[in-house]
Amino acid sequence: VQLQACGGGLVQAGGSLRLSCAASGRTFSNYVMGWFRQAPGKEREFVAAISRSGSSTNYADSVKGRFTISRDNAKNAVYLQMNSLKPEDTAVYYCATTFSDWDTAVVRSQVRYSRWGQGTQVTVSS
């Protein structure tokens, strides 16, 4: 599977952005999908994950209540709706796939993800 993320940009604090990640291939629904981010000078970190059917989600504490992950298996796409953005949300955002079973500890671990998109830059100004 190949992943293409888009939707990043420059937004003022308090604003919103919606990231999209399109996947190639016919097995998209077999994957747990995740979003990660990497800020300048920092390690890449978990943001959110969604189960194969979309019935289960998991979020980093730093984005809980502000970000929403969703997916459309018919369109081979996963989304990240980001509201109430803060300057500390500035980062390159990556989507990724894993064949791992849904387990909240597992899906937060980037080493479990085998395919990564190219990343999309999100910049939040104060």
Image: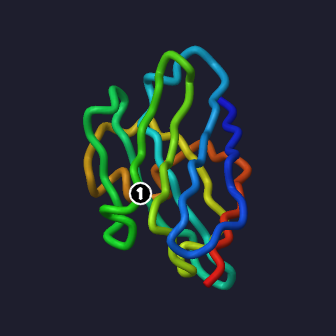
Q: What x and y, as percent, mark residue 5?
A: 68, 44
Above or below residue 37? Residue 89 is below
**Coloring scheme of the render?**
rainbow
Q: Quadrant of the N terminus?
A: top right
Q: What x and y, as percent, mark residue 11?
A: 65, 67
From the viewer's perspective, tell me whether residue 9 is left or right of residue 93.
right
The amino acid type, in three-letter code, at marker 1 is Phe
From the viewer's perspective, tell me whether residue 65 is left or right of residue 75.
left
Which residue is found at the position 46% from the left and 60% from the top?
A: 83
Which residue is found at the position 55% from the left and 30% from the top?
A: 77
Q: What x and y, as percent, mark residue 87?
A: 57, 80
Q: Quadrant of the C terminus?
A: bottom right
Which residue is found at the position 62% from the left and 73% from the top?
A: 12
In which quadrant of the rendered view does residue 101 lie? top left
Q: Which residue is mark 1?
A: 67
Instruction: Please state which of residues 109 and 54 is positioned toward the viewer in this rendering.
Output: 54
Instruction: Please state which of residues 5 and 34 is positioned toward the viewer in this rendering.
Output: 5
Which residue is found at the position 32% from the left and 63% from the top?
A: 64
